[in-house]
Each structure stands twice: as structure tokens, then as C-alpha cells.
Image: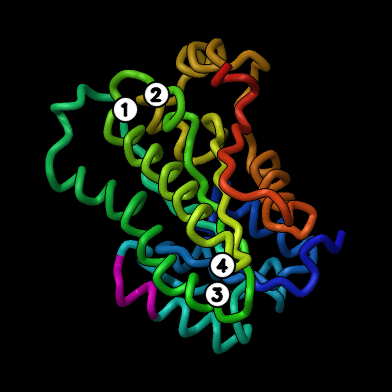
Amino acid sequence: MTRLAGKRAIVTGGASGFGAGIARRFIAEGARVAIADLNAEGAAALAGELGAACLAVPTDIADSAGVEALFTRVTSAFGGIDILVNNAGMGAAPAPLEAMDEARFDRLMSVNVRSVYLTARHAVPLMKAQGGGAILNIASTGGVSPRPNLVWYNASKGWMIAAGRAMAAELAPFGVRVNVINPVAGDTPMLATFMGGDSPEARARFLATIPMGRFSTPADIAAAAVFLCSDEASLVTGIAMEVDGGRCL
């Protein structure tokens, strides 16, 4: 398992859920990984488990100074960056679109949208200078096939998809590939938020919308992430890959 041997990666929101799955798989595939997460204790615990190739960097990914400090720390430790995974995200409980207050809306957009802009400002110049790199946005099936009562969350993930495709078009001449993964809801700590509470009945209702009949897992998303960030996908850029058990069919 050396598909990412020698690669240097940042995984935002890497302390839990999909991000932790991606970090684990990247390490197993030979990469060095920086886990950037607001949850400093969780990031440190996972980095300690994964060993010397993993670095925990407590980061508010929506804060400009925090992102700058993240890239300073990582480039100092790793000597550069080959892969950026924009995985950090914030969910929203189902509610009518007019019910979300401004403070919640602003935080949602800061975490899901502004963070991608902030990381790109630092990652792209480094990747251009070295002649290549891979950026991966973890969006959502909600950005492709939105459901009612999650309007602003769906919109933030749709932005991530559009941004990823636009970035791919601009950065292709520099050897920088940009792709997107759209997971269906996963059995992660955010699941209860999306369902408006966790119960057997809520799970059954949600699973009924997924033709393959199960939620996604961190391992599912990590497998797709390894391919898209590896040299095996050297001619793949600008795609939005559904990992959704048929949810968007």
C-alpha cells in the first residue's frame, strides 16, 4: 500500500468522521499527513495513534490567521505540500430556510465555503511553484440532489462543487488537479444532525432514499480520496464523484 508514497498532505477536519478515515488511509498508503482540526485533543489523539508520519495542527479553518499558521507549520515540518483535502465541514439540522438566523448562516458559510478560499490562497502558490499537486473538496450529494429544509447547507456544498470545477479549469495548465467527492450521508457524528435526531425510524427513512441500502463510511470516502489524489488519477481533474450508493440516480 504505497500509492501515496512520498506525498505530503493536509486533511482539514481530520480528527473524526470522513477526515479521520482519509487520514488513516493516506498514512497507510505512505503519505505524511497533517490533521488540521478545531478539535485539538481529537487531532492529537489520532496523530499519536498514526505515528511519526502524522502531525496534528489545531486550526480554525475559517480563520485567515489560523490557516496561514497551518501552512507555515506544515511547510516547515514537511518541506511542502502535495495534497490538500478540504474536508472540514459544518452540518445543519433540518428546518425551513427562513428559520436559520444570520449568525448560524455566517458560520456555516465560513466553515463550508470561506475555508476553501482560504486554503487555496496558500496551497495553490506552493503547488504552482513545484509544478503540480492535488486538491480534493469533500462536498455532498446535497449539492447535487438537494432535499427540502437543508437549503443553506445544500447551497454551501453546491458552491464547493462549482468552486472545485472552476479551480480545475484554471489550474490544469500548472499541473494542479482539483476534484470533488459527494458522499451520501455517512454513519459519522454528523448523521444525527442531518436527520434531526438519531432513531431507528429516522435511519430507516433515510436509508429508504439510498438504493444500495446503507450509509457511507469513512472507509468508502477514503478509498475514493486515495485514487483521486494519487498518480493513478493523473489525467482526472474537474470531476464530482458521487460515493452515494445510487442516491443521486
Q: Badge 1: few (under 14), some or many (20 or more) residues near its Cα, within 10 Å?
A: some
Between disc 1 and disc 2, the foreground one is 2
For the question of whether residue 47 can be seen, the reply is: no
Q: Mark 3 = which residue?
A: 128
Q: Amino acid at mark 1?
A: Leu
Q: Mark 1 = which residue?
A: 150
- Whether residues under marks 1 and 2 lie with C-beta atoms below 8 angstroms apart, the answer is yes
**Residue for point 15% across, 48% down:** 103
* Rendered view: 129 above or below 248: below
Colouring style? rainbow
For the question of whether residue 112 can be seen, the reply is: yes
Q: CA distance from mark 3 to mark 4?
A: 17 Å
Q: Amino acid at mark 4?
A: Ile
SS class of the residue under badge 4?
A: strand
Decide if residue 40 is on the left or right side of residue 90. right
Between disc 3 and disc 4, the foreground one is 3
Q: CA distance from mark 2 to mark 4?
A: 29 Å
- Whether residues under marks 2 and 4 lie with C-beta atoms below 8 angstroms apart, the answer is no
Q: Mark 2 = which residue?
A: 146
Q: CA distance from mark 2 to mark 3?
A: 35 Å
Main SS of residues in magenta: helix
Between disc 2 and disc 3, the foreground one is 3
Q: Mark 4 = which residue?
A: 10
- Whether residues under marks 4 and 1 lie with C-beta atoms below 8 angstroms apart, the answer is no
Q: Read off the magenta span.
A: 63-68
